[in-house]
Structure formats: structure tokens, C-alpha cells
Image (tube, rainbow, N blue to C red):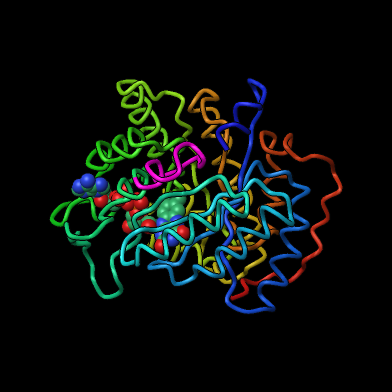
Amino acid sequence: IKERVQELGKDDIFYSFEFFPPKTESGLRNLMARMGRMSVLNPLFVTVTWGAGGSTSRKTLELASTCQQELGFTTCMHLTCTNTDKSIIDNALQKAKEFGVRNILALRGDPPVGEEYYSPDPNNDFCYAVDLIRYIRKNYGDYFCIGVAGYPEGHVEGSHDSEQDPAKDLPYLMEKVSAGADFIITQLFYDVDKFVEFEQKVRLELEKINKQDTLIIPGLMPINNYQLFNRASKLSHASIPTSISNRFDDCIKTDDDKVKEIGVEILDDIVKQIYRKTNGRIKGFHFYTLNLEKSIAQIIDRSEILSKVIANDEFENAIDDECIDQ
Ligand code: FAD
């Protein structure tokens, strides 16, 4: 990823897509067809999520291998390190290397189900994401380009007894970069000002450790349906500015087509604002696709900034009644 970004021109923009491995064969078939069509959108890279505790390890590896080897995407595999047997991590890294996957998003993982707060056990090999980064660098040198998670509104366990606060996570984010991370992808957000404040603070800290080349990539989730939008923002602790929530009055909330249409306008506006408010410092945008293509394609098509990336105008959005496949 780092190399591909370095190859871009000074004013070039890029975007990337996150996919998750479907549980069923039919879900996988649909996803493959969608990813095939989405390749025309020319994402700089795609990422494949990893189920907490290694629960999707086989499917994640299969999908990452397909993305890299069959579909020709520059692929980044997510990998979490807690509540996981070390052999699962070793196998995942080894297989990723065999498949030619050269990018890992190194994550800690959420606390086990039922536990609100995470309590690290110092006897474990991995307590935080930084331990995984150190492990990868120790065993694989520079083979992998490593990404990490950043939280514009603060990670929710930043503290057991106070509000989430991005300032509390900042030293740990710098620790991850110092340990060898090359890029930061953020948690999804809808409040651009919070992101811009985060981005400025992160850049100041990166300068102090002489890592100003570290990429900061905002994570954006399209709005496909009102309930999902609400649930995803609550789960991710992303605040919704009133300028956005006001756009969904009660009669619109249940009209999925209208919600999608407004969602595309909102995301287009978010991209524009990020670009403008960071004076073009942000070059890349990461989309949490939820394995759906329609709204992504519409956002890119509508956006003056993103539409320049499309290789040609062959993209045909063939799906009329797209739904999330498991
Ligand atoms: P860390 O960087 O380890 O931080 C976790 C918390 O611990 C933070 O509050 C931080 O401030 C604190 N902390 C960090 N280091 C230390 C330290 N040395 N001492 C004390 N406190 C410390 N989850 C999945 O299961 N699968 C996925 O595929 C996945 N993909 C994701 C992709 C992105 C872009 C993002 C933003 C999140 C993703 N997650 C995924 C969720 C992620 O696993 C959780 O948010 C998890 O709770 C934290 O992971 P982290 O890597 O940010 O942890």
C-alpha cells in the first residue's frame, strides 16, 4: 500500500474498500460478482476483515487470497491478536505471505463477548495491537506493510471511568507507529470537524517522532438504510451531527430508497469537506462497504473528487435490490 501510494501523482486521490467474508456459499458468490464489477472503480486496495478470536480465519484467508490472486486487488488482511491462539496468528501470517498478500491491518480485537472492558493478561503474548506489530516486524522484517486503527472520537475503552477521548489514545497510536505501522485507518465517523481535529493532532505527534510520512486514511460508511446507519454509528460510538440527523425525518426513515439517496449526498459532502478542511492533505478514503456496491458506486460517481479515480466509465451498477448477504 505504501509503495502504491508513493507511485501516485502529487494531486492524485485514492480510495479503498473493506469487505467481510460471507458465511454462506451464496453470499460468497454474490460478493465475488460484486467485487468483479467494483474492480472497474479502481480501488487502490481492498481490505478483508478478521473475525474476533480468529473465528473467520479460514474464510478470511480464502477471501484475501481470492482478492489478491484472482481479482488482482492489492489486498490488506485484518488480523486481531487477543483471545487467539498464537498458532492461528502464525498460520495467518504465513499463509498471507504465501498468497502474496503484503498488507496487514494489525488490531487488538474487542473484549470477549459479555465483557464490557478489556483486561490484558500480562502472561499473554499479545495484549495490545502494538504487540502484534512488533511480532510481525520481528518475524517478517519489512515484508508486510502494516496498518493500524485510529479513533477520531476516541476508543471506547480509552478509560474505564471517563468519556472516550482521542487524546488518551494518542500516545498509544504513536507507539504503534514507532513499532512499525505505515498507515492509519480510522474508525467510521460522520462528524468531519472531529476527524479534522484528530488528523491535525496526529500529524503534530507524528512529526515529533519523525514519522510524518504515515498515511492517515479516514474510514467512511455509506448510509444504506436508516436502522443500519443508526446501529453502526452507535456500535462504533460515532456521533451524528444534527445537520445530518435533521435530514432524516420520520417519513423518510422507512423509505430505503430515499435514505440511500440522501446518504449518497451526505457522503459526497463529507468527502468534499474532509478534502477542503485538511487542505488536500488527505489523499485517500476508505469505505466500509458492508459488501454492498450500489451506494459506493453512486458516491464515487457523484463526487467531483473521487470520480477522477475511475479507470473508465464502464461501471454498470447492475443490482437493483441489493441486500447484505451473510
Ligand atoms: P489498540 O491499539 O491495542 O488499543 C486498544 C485500547 O487500548 C485503546 O483504548 C488504547 O488507547 C489502549 N491501549 C493501547 N495500547 C495500550 C497500552 N500499551 N497500555 C494501555 N492501554 C493501551 N475488530 C475485529 O475483530 N476484526 C476486524 O477485522 C476489525 N477491523 C477493524 C478495522 C478498523 C479500521 C477499526 C478502526 C477497527 C477494527 N476492528 C476490528 C475493531 C478493533 O479490534 C477494536 O476497536 C478493538 O477494541 C481495538 O483494537 P485496536 O487495534 O485499536 O487496539
- Image: 210 above or below 131: above
User: Front-most of 200 and 128?
Assistant: 128
- Residue 26 left/right relative to 86: right
Residue 107 position, x and y percent, is 38, 53
User: Front-most of 17 and 6?
Assistant: 6
Q: In the rendered image, which quarter is residue 10 located in? A: top right
143 magenta-colored: yes
Q: In the rendered image, which quarter is residue 300 located in? A: top right
Answer whether residue 233 is visible to the viewer in this image. no
User: Front-most of 83 and 264?
Assistant: 83
Q: Residue at x 78, y 57 (%)?
A: 37
Residue 74 position, x and y percent, is 64, 45
User: Front-most of 304 and 296?
Assistant: 296
Q: Residue at x 68, y 49 (%)?
A: 73
**Which contiguous range is marked in magenta?**
135-149
Residue 154 position, x and y percent, is 30, 46
Q: Residue at x 33, y 32 (%)?
A: 178
- Image: 187 above or below 228: above
Quarter of the figure that contains the C terminus: bottom right
Residue 50 position, x and y percent, is 48, 62
Q: Residue at x 33, y 39 (%)?
A: 176
- Residue 171 left/right relative to 95: left
47 magenta-colored: no
Q: How many marks?
A: 0
- Image: 56 above or below 182: below
Quarter of the figure that contains the N terminus: top right
Q: Specify the farthest residue to the left.
A: 161
Answer whether residue 130 is visible to the viewer in this image. yes
